[in-house]
């Protein structure tokens, strides 16, 4: 008998939590027994650490399968950097094991508290997408537990349709049991970062394009409340791997060792209106002033995971939570689309202080993978009810008009019609799902909302 508990679950944004049945299987045998019990468990869904922002890891009326017991690193080849692990292993775990041996993550999102299974399902990306692509590009093999309880091994050259439907497939093709990941070699745990301020959107986009080939990592903070000639002012943080000779004498003695940081925590939920136009505007002024043009050597934690040092930072948005809105525009419409998004944010006054702009590179073969060449802008938008919903509807119209797209791992509100327009390869994904999960055993609230359900 597998214990079930009732828990209230949501995405990281805390928007519209739902009551779900939760199980934490301790073996593949228990997973198979759950899949065999179609009456007790008509729908199932894997969930990692809950860092997707919306409802993609929530299943009302089904069984949410936590991956906490599937956290073993099974093998690591120090010579080649190939690691095989269970899906519940976190990116933090991989760093802890691989970095001291000269290997780092091939790409990483803005938190290391993500499971490998979640990183594959969301096909996560980072500051180096324009150079190294998404996480899925670095997966060599997957082992999936399918809806009928059978196991299937797949990869780019073995059952490629299933593999690429699983990469970016938001957990809807099956339960990822384990994966083989190609890590990337490094010589230190540090990065050379150039901080560059730019006065407006035009200057920001021009600088990102000009530096594309000079930096492996590129990311920018955008002031969403700046108006007029300062619209889109930014601080770009352009990075490359640091070499041993770039380090101080003390750092060079231990090039893979990073001093532990004092971790802070947000112990309570902030009042719902703590983040308002005035407080965000003040933060933006301080942040812009605190980042003059300079170059610096920083450790991986500081550069990639600044928010990981603040536990429960999502509580600053209050109990009503927030939605994240990550917009992607192709190069030809990026300037116009981003300008329209920033003007809309300013007009509604619901600006995000965590607004991040990045360059994206070529798409991979996954039908639901998010990125293609262009620019992305990620925004945290506080949930203030109908005003937030109306602004998001207007943002959706801008994206659709300019050929843009939303990221499923960040999405909380996208409609089925909008999803169909933004993801023209939807039917390719559904053809694979129909083959491996014709009864819709693997279901999420997001899948229901955007129409990623097999119909007869």
Image (cartoon, helix red, strand yellow):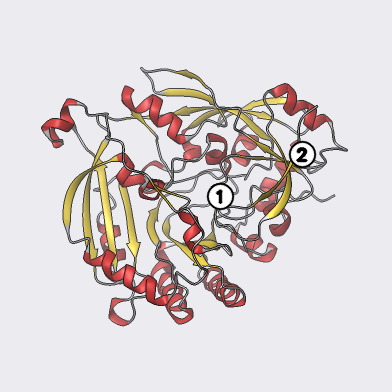
Residue 75: image x %, image y %?
48, 18
Residue indicated by mark 1: 52
Left or right? Give the position of 293 relative to 401: left
Report the residue at 64% width, 30% height from top.
Answer: 159
> In the rendered view of the protein, which quadrant contains the N terminus?
top right
Left or right? Give the position of 135 relative to 171: left
Disc 2 element: loop
Left or right? Give the position of 171 relative to 43: left
Residue indicated by mark 2: 437
Residue 307: image x %, image y %?
39, 50
Q: Nearer the viewer, residue 97 or 162?
A: 97
Residue 7: image x %, image y %?
70, 46
Quarter occupied by residue 231: bottom left
Report the residue at 31% width, 41% height from top.
Answer: 261
Disc 1 element: loop
Task: Please tell me whether mark 2 or mark 1 is closer to you in this view.
Answer: 1
Check the image and report above or below for 86 versus 402: above
Between the residue at mark 2 and the residue at mark 1, the CA separation in whole angstroms equals: 23 Å
Check the image and report above or below for 416 versus 443: below
Report the residue at 47% width, 40% height from top.
Answer: 113
Q: Is residue 244 visible?
A: no
Q: Is residue 96 visible?
A: yes
Quarter occupied by residue 419: bottom right
Quarter occupied by residue 250: top left
Q: Earlier in the sequence, mark 2 or mark 1?
A: 1
Q: How many marks?
A: 2
Report the residue at 60% width, 55% height from top.
Answer: 54
Labels 2 and 1 touching (C-beta < 8 A)? no
Q: Nearer the viewer, residue 188 or 40?
A: 40
Residue 439: image x %, image y %?
82, 42
Which residue ends up furthest to the right in the rendered image? Answer: 39
């Amino acid at each position: 008998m597998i214990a079930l508990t009732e828990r209230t679950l949501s995405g990281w944004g805390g928007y519209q939590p739902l009551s779900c049945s939760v199980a934490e299987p301790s073996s593949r045998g228990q997973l198979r027994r759950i899949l065999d019990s179609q009456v007790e468990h008509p729908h199932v869904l894997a969930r990692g650490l809950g860092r997707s922002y919306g409802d993609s890891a929530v299943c009302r009326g089904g069984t949410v399968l936590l991956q906490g017991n599937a956290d073993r690193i099974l093998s690591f080849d120090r010579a080649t950097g190939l690691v095989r692990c269970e899906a519940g292993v976190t990116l933090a775990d991989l760093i802890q094991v691989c970095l001291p041996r000269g290997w780092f993550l091939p790409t990483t999102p803005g938190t290391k508290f993500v499971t490998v299974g979640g990183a594959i399902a969301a096909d996560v990306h980072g500051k180096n997408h324009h150079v190294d692509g998404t996480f899925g590009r670095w997966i060599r093999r997957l082992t999936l537990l399918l809806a009928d309880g059978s196991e299937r091994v797949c990869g780019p050259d073995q059952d490629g349709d299933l593999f690429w439907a699983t990469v970016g497939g938001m957990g809807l093709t099956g339960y990822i049991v384990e994966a083989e990941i190609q890590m990337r070699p490094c010589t230190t745990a540090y990065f050379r970062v150039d901080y560059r301020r730019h006065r407006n959107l035009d200057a920001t986009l021009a600088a990102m394009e000009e530096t594309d080939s000079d930096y492996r990592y590129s990311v920018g903070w955008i002031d969403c409340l700046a108006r007029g000639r300062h619209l889109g002012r930014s601080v770009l943080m352009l990075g490359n791997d640091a070499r041993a000779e770039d380090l101080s004498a003390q750092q060079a003695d231990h090039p893979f060792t990073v001093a532990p940081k004092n971790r802070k925590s947000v112990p309570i939920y902030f009042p719902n209106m703590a983040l308002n136009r005035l407080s965000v505007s003040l933060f933006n002024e301080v942040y812009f002033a605190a980042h003059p043009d300079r170059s610096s050597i920083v450790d991986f934690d500081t550069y990639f995971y600044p928010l990981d040092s603040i536990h429960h930072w999502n509580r600053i948005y209050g109990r009503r939570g927030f939605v994240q809105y990550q917009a992607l525009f192709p190069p030809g419409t990026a300037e116009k689309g981003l300008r329209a998004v920033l003007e809309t944010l300013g007009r509604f006054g619901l600006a995000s202080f965590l607004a991040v702009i990045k360059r994206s590179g070529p798409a991979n073969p996954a039908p639901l993978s998010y990125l293609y060449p262009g620019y992305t802008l990620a925004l945290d938008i506080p949930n203030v009810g109908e005003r937030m919903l109306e602004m998001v509807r207007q943002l959706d119209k801008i994206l659709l008009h300019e050929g843009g797209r939303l990221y499923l791992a960040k999405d909380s509100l996208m409609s089925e019609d909008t999803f169909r327009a933004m993801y023209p390869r939807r039917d390719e994904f559904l053809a694979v799902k129909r083959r491996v999960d014709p009864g819709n055993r693997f279901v999420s609230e997001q899948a229901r909302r955007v129409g990623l359900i097999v119909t007869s």
